[in-house]
Image (cartoon, rainbow, N blue to C red):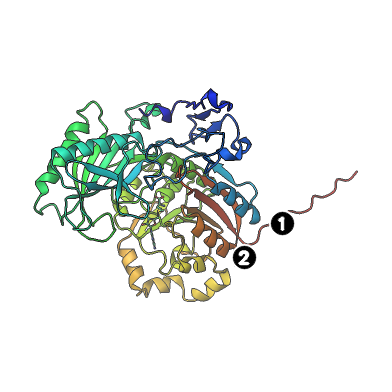
Amino acid sequence: MAAFNLLPLYLTVPTSTSLSRFTCQVTKSPSAAVHIGKPPEQLPTSLHQNPNPNSNFPPSLTCALQCSHFESCSGCTHEYNLHRPDIVDEATDFFEKLGVSDFTFDSCRLWGWRCRAKLAVRGSSTKPLIGLYVEGTHNVVDIPDCKAHHPSINVAVELLKRGIIEANIEPYDEDRGTGELRYVQMAVTTYDTSLPTSQRYKNGKVQVSLVWNSRNENSPGQEKLNALAYFLWRNGGPKTKTNMIHSVWANFQTSTNNIIFGNRWRHLFGENDFWEHVGGIDVSLAPSSFGQANTRAFDSLLRKLQKYVPYGTSVTDLYAGAGVIGLSLAATRKCRSIKCVEVNKESKLSFEKTVERLPSILNCNISWHQADTSVDPISWIVGSDVVVVDPPRKGLEPSLVSALQMSTRQLKRTFSESPSAKAKSEKRPWILRAKEASIQYKSIPEEEERQSLPGTLIYVSCGWHSFKEDCLSLVSGKTWHLEKAHGFNFFPGTESIEILAVFKRGARATKKAGKKKRR
Ligand SMILES: C[S@@+](CC[C@H](N)C(=O)[O-])C[C@H]1O[C@@H](n2cnc3c(N)ncnc32)[C@H](O)[C@@H]1O
């Protein structure tokens, strides 16, 4: 079923169309780069996005989505040329104008890439619908054959439907606030070391989180939740032929707003810990913690990002989630210190578990702080050589942009009080709270706090429009210049791409005119 993910895929346009034969191969290379028989630039324009239905040429199937749910489902907006969204051209121009002419775009895996999906459950107990909302509505469209999902997600969704029918579960009714099952999160781990590496991805196992419409596990109707969870485990767990359910969790949510998860979680079946391997380290991810949807593309991005962090530096990882970026740098770049800052306290446990699996010989002081980056951001930045930011789609908060634009002179004015005196007299409640909720692993003597500003800023962005604004603000102040930029196809079938941008402090060094050789 998942064979197309690893084996070369040949798509042939019917010969009767008189079109030449195009092939689209997905390779086994780490980033699963796409090689196409004919470069897209050479295709007739009618074969690109929005093909003209009256044209004699049918749209090329080269790297096409070919999903039966396209148009009814809001997940994908682009059907053709999945390997190169149109926005790549805009990005290339944008970076060129800022002096970066070697912008690269890594196409990654085009189908079966989504390893993490949050799906709404609606319909009835005899005909459940599990999928996404139709654009602009709250009507759910069923997507059993989604081409973006890792194939194990589609198998798990099918099993869940059977379970809903068998256990007579009532899907949630938003208008009335009634029903039992509201959403399901499916997260795939592709890290089963009992399998050869080449078989791990396609045999990914699913951590299923059922969002239940009750306050907690003691509310009435829990026997139905238990029956559904047991059905999934009995029919998809380790004793079955498919063996694709990793674990089953419950989340309890009764609020009528659009927030998917409530605060209460309960582990019901299977392994408690969910491990993935990205950026050279084993990463633990609780269902409540943020996790990247495209595991393979994220791995490619991390490997590229690592190259921009000099060995032995101190790094602050802002918007850190469970600290995947920071900890992968600790392990691969021998960092002196890693400070992770994240607002969601649920990520703390995953961070701790990941740290436990890091090589024990790391000479690195590692910490994780539960804090809002927008509050007093300079306190997190100062003293680091490198700052990594990976904000949500809306981009950086203005207070963080201002802090990043601060000059050394301005910093000295702000920090006129000595740091040690400041620490002793610290009264700001958000700093005290962050200190309380923090975790510290010290393996080398702590340096005296430095009053220096970072020389490198690495921006990881999933929101192109907010990124452009932030990028222009950062370079306009002349504090930073853009040094490198890379794009990654994190969300094939959409116009969204992930950006990795590297900024360096100060103005770009102008190239010296080469000395003339003496004759
Ligand atoms: C795009 S995710 C990146 C997470 C992490 N870097 C990773 O790749 O796994 C953005 C993260 O920022 C966190 N976040 C959002 N607003 C924040 C804020 N104001 N301060 C700190 N963290 C925030 C979210 O909870 C989320 O974990």
- At x 91%, y 43%, the residue is 519
Q: Secondary structure at mark 2?
A: loop
Location of residue 180 in the rendering, given as x and y in whole percent from the top left corner:
17, 50
* Amino acid at circle 1: Thr
Q: From the image, which quarter does the N terminus lie in?
A: top left
Q: Quadrant of ligand 1?
A: bottom left
Q: Which residue is mark 1?
A: 510
* Amino acid at circle 2: Lys
Mark 1 CB lies closer than 8 A to ligand 1: no
Residue 175, compared with residue 36, is above or below; it is: below
Residue 388, compared with residue 451, is above or below; it is: above
Give the number of callouts.
Answer: 2
Location of residue 419 in the rendering, given as x and y in whole percent from the top left corner:
45, 70
Q: Secondary structure at mark 1?
A: loop
Residue 268, compared with residue 5, is above or below; it is: below
The front one of 65 and 456 is 65
Q: Quick check: 189 left or right of 239?
A: right
User: Separation of disc 2 and disc 1 at Cα?
Assistant: 14 Å
Label 1, residues with CA under 10 Å away: few <14, some 14-19, many ≥20: few
- At x 21%, y 45%, the residue is 249
The front one of 379 and 32 is 32
Label placed on residue 478: 2
Residue 23 visible in the shown view: yes
- At x 51%, y 47%, the residue is 305
Residue 271 visible in the shown view: no
